[in-house]
Image (tube, rainbow, N blue to C red):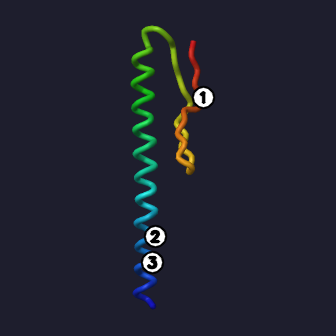
Amino acid sequence: MHKLKTIVITLLVVLILAVGGIWGYLWYSTKQQVDDIVALAKPFADISYGGIEISPAGSIGVSGFKSS
């Protein structure tokens, strides 16, 4: 029974680390793409944004987008 408990806990920890890694990769990748777009538009407009949002359903968005 102790061995089964250890295996289940180990699998749970691995799953949590994998989900965290995927979330981090998506956040960082999206941030880099948005930063690149903002840098390209810099000569033509002043663009800023509040942050990157990732939902558990798989949606990724940019919040607080402002342009002037």
Q: What SS does tag 1 mark?
A: loop
| Residue 11: % across, % down | 42, 72
Q: Please give left or right for residue 33 compared with residue 49 in the image.
A: left
- Location of the N terminus by quadrant is bottom left
Q: Earlier in the sequence, mark 2 or mark 1?
A: 2
Other residues around mark 2 within 10 Å, as few (<14) / some (14–19) / many (≥20): few
Q: Determine the residue positioned at 40% across, 19% down.
A: 39
- Location of the C terminus by quadrant is top right
Identify the residue at the far bottom of this view.
Answer: 1
Q: What SS does tag 3 mark?
A: helix
Please name the residue that numbered disc 2 is placed on: 12
| Residue 54: % across, % down | 53, 43
Query: Is 68 rendered above or below residue 33?
Result: above
Residue 8: give its label: 3
Three-letter code, disc 3: Val
Please name the residue that numbered disc 1 is placed on: 64
Three-letter code, disc 1: Gly
